[in-house]
Image (cartoon, rainbow, N blue to C red):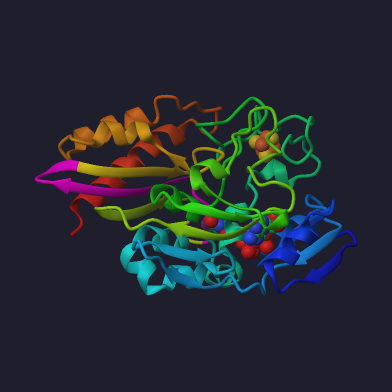
């Protein structure tokens, strides 16, 4: 690990000013950043510890929604009674991620900003456009079993690893940002991440020093919520494919639905194609399969990950069936 300076801040504005310095980086739970620093993939010269900022609260909003502070621990959000009752898909997604110990340290902001788990990104001997722009993509033509089937480019085929972000996409969450000069803005979770195109090292729309201060959830959508995660082992593993679904039925017909995938692309993947194929149709296996075909119509494998296209379809069908049947 390289030498760096460290400062712990107690208010958000000080943090943002400090983070506007070249080479500065926020550290929250440190569960992703410290690993990357040890490998010299992340090389910050100045760390701003934001873990003590007063951003841990989960508050009811007047419209029936919820505001979750960026410093709330993943385990606290998952266990919050209001989250479990009103947004069970979020609670399920969080519990499906990492381990109990990691979830105690991991923050909401850090979870959203965690880096990809592409093995070549972690291997400093391999070419990787995300880690070292212009050095190529070792996953294309390499062992790409866990890689993206949607939204990738010829420069990068990495997936985004967060389970929480997938549930937030289905819940249409908004992300609160604080920038220098106290500029605040709120962006839809679907707009937070950038597709790789030719610049895979630029992963989000955050500006220099900008910090996530919280997540707002609109009132719960109608219907039943399910998060299903398919992975190589039962726990402590990232998703090969995951699906967050919110499904409402009326007399056996799908009346409203939200669908988002994890493990398929460089960002949590809301599937408007699947949703359009579901609304107004009978909640049957045939409808679910048609929605799955629509969701994956543009999917493209790169060899080892070809199986993910069918896996994504089946995971969606199973998730929809469960959501449509549960009481
Ligand atoms: C073994 C292992 C298994 C895991 N399995 C899963 C899994 O199955 N599913 C899953 O979703 N995750 C998984 N994770 C990832 C884990 O959830 C993340 O490491 C964690 O959520 C990151 O949060 P943190 O607070 O520790 O972030 P940090 O490591 O402190 O920071 C991560 C990044 O976010 C930035 N950052 C932090 N807070 C903010 C903020 N408020 N605003 C702007 N930038 C910020 C930092 O600068 C840094 O770049 C796993 C991790 C490990 C080590
Ligand atoms: S997929 Fe992206 S992160 Fe992985 S090696 Fe290629 S450029 Fe790097």
Locate the C terminus and report the quarter of the image it occupies: bottom left
Q: Which residues are magenta?
A: 236-254
In this view, the residue in front, 81 or 218, is: 218
Magenta segment includes 124: no
Q: Quadrant of ligand 2?
A: top right
Q: Position of residue 175 (x, y in %)?
A: 53, 53
Q: Position of residue 189 (x, y in %)?
A: 50, 47
Number of numbered labels in the structure image: 0
Q: Residue 70 is drawn in which quadrant? A: bottom right
Q: Position of residue 125 (x, y in %)?
A: 81, 41
Q: Does any portion of residue 237 appear in the rendered image?
A: no
Q: Residue 109 is drawn in which quadrant? A: bottom right
Q: Position of residue 43 (x, y in %)?
A: 83, 53
In this view, the residue in front, 60 or 40, is: 60
Q: Residue at x 56, y 62 (%)?
A: 108
Q: Residue at x 33, y 44 (%)?
A: 258
């Amino acid at each position: 690990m390289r030498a760096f300076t460290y400062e712990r801040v107690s208010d958000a504005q000080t943090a943002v000013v400090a983070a506007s310095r070249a080479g500065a980086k926020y550290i929250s739970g440190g569960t992703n950043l410290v690993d990357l620093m040890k490998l010299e993939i992340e090389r910050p010269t100045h760390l701003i510890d934001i873990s003590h900022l007063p951003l841990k609260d989960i508050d009811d909003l007047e419209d029936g929604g919820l505001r979750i502070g960026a410093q709330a621990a993943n385990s606290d959000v998952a266990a919050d009674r209001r989250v479990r009752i009103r947004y069970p898909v979020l609670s399920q997604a969080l519990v499906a991620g990492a381990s109990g110990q990691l979830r105690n340290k991991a923050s909401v902001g850090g979870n959203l900003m965690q880096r990809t788990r592409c093995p070549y990104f972690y291997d400093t001997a391999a070419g990787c456009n995300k880690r070292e722009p212009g050095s190529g993509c070792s996953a294309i033509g390499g062992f790409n079993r866990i890689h993206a089937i949607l939204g990738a480019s010829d420069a990068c085929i990495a997936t985004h690893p967060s389970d929480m972000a997938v549930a937030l996409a289905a819940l249409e969450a908004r992300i609160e940002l604080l920038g220098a000069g106290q500029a605040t803005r709120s962006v839809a979770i679907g707009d937070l991440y950038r597709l790789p195109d030719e610049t895979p090292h630029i992963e989000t729309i955050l500006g220099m020093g900008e910090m996530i201060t919280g997540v707002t959830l609109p009132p719960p959508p109608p219907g039943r919520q399910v998060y299903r995660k398919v992975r190589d082992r039962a726990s402590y593993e990232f998703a090969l494919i995951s699906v967050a679904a919110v499904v409402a039925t009326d007399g056996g017909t799908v009346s409203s639905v939200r669908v988002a995938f994890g493990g398929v692309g460089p960002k949590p993947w809301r599937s408007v194609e699947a949703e359009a194929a579901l609304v107004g149709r009978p909640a049957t296996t045939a409808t679910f399969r048609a929605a799955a075909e629509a969701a994956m119509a543009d999917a493209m494998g790169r060899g080892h990950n070809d199986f993910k296209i069918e896996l994504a379809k089946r995971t969606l069908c199973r998730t929809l069936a469960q959501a449509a049947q549960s009481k």
